[in-house]
Amino acid sequence: MLRIVDYAKRSNMEWYEVVRISINEETINGPIAILTHGELRVFELDDDELIGNFPGQEPIQLAYEECEMNPAFLSRLIHARFPVVFKPVNKNKSGVAGDFYQLDNIPLKPPTLIKFKDMDKVWFGFNNEIHISLDEIWMPSNSILSKPIEQKREIQNKHKKHIKPHSFFIAFQIENGKRMFSSWQHLKKLSAESRGSEKVDLPGYGPIYLKQDSKDIKKSILYSENPFRSSTDGKIVRKGSFDRAWNRIVRQN
């Protein structure tokens, strides 16, 4: 068993590359989370659509269990700021409890949850606040990349060529309820921070180099996978193409 950061170094990769490959279902025995704390509560939906404690079920311990992570959560990890926090089940002002999950969408799945498979009326919630650090994400010792590392990178690079970084960013922003104008402003802010020489984390995509276009600072930015060395480096994203991509992705959703 290796921490994912150590596994990535051994494989001459970045840890988020390992996660991306796992999301694409190209890894046998992918990343798992091993926490030092936490409990899951189990609930059941009755015939009147009211939710209550599952009869006779004690809270399920998460501490030191090898918890499987679902693809949606793995995708979130790529651009996450650690520690990742999950709130416990609680009631809002209307008296309705939130933060429930079913078996197919719960972020962390300890092995004991297998007994609830195909039980559609069973729900889960964290019993207390959960904090997940990067050091708590591991790769099992029998993890196998189904194809050679360099071939994986080639696949990823081809994929990136077809889907531009700002499209990943737009999809992430839309999914999180952000608006077009504020998202463009955030992209410009990241460009100013990167200046073409500092790698920044583009939400929904990952590390990248961004730079303001000196020819049109208000309506254009430049991006590159490598540091900018000359005025001709980078590919351009104009505000007009950003807006069209935004509208296209909104329609697709």
Image (spheres, grey):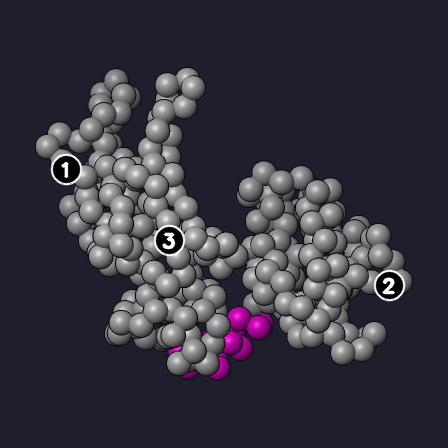
**Per the image, is 154 magenta?**
yes
Name which residue lies at 63% across and 63% down: 200
Side of 17 where 225 appears, left or right:
right
Q: Disc 2 residue type? A: Ser
Residue 63 locus on image (x, y percent): 23, 52
**Label 2 element class:** loop
Side of 222 where 133 appears, left or right:
left
Query: How much space separates mark 2 and mark 1, taking CA atoms?
Result: 61 Å
Name which residue lies at 31% across and 72% down: 2
Q: Disc 1 residue type? A: Glu
Q: Looking at this view, is 160 or 87 the one in front?
A: 87
- Please identify the quarter of the rendering in which residue 41 is found: top left
Does residue 76 sit above or below 51 in this rendering? below
- From the image, state whether disc 3 or disc 2 is nearer to you: 3
Q: Looking at this view, is 211 or 159 the one in front?
A: 211
Residue 61 locus on image (x, y percent): 20, 47
**Label 1 element class:** loop
Residue 186 locus on image (x, y percent): 69, 49
Query: Disc 1 designates what residue?
Result: 58
- From the image, state whether disc 1 or disc 3 is nearer to you: 3
Residue span colored magenta? 147-158
Query: Disc 2 designates what residue?
Result: 214
Query: How much space separates mark 3 and mark 2, taking CA atoms?
Result: 41 Å
Name which residue lies at 60% across and 46% down: 173
**Per the image, is 234 magenta?**
no
Location of the N terminus by quadrant is: bottom left
How packed is label 2: few (under 14 Cα within 10 Å), some, or many (20 or more)?
A: few
Query: How much space separates mark 1 and mark 3, taking CA atoms?
Result: 23 Å
Location of the C terminus by quadrant is: top right
Does residue 253 sit above or below 225 in this rendering? above
Query: Disc 3 designates what residue?
Result: 132
- Please identify the quarter of the rendering in which residue 231 is found: bottom right
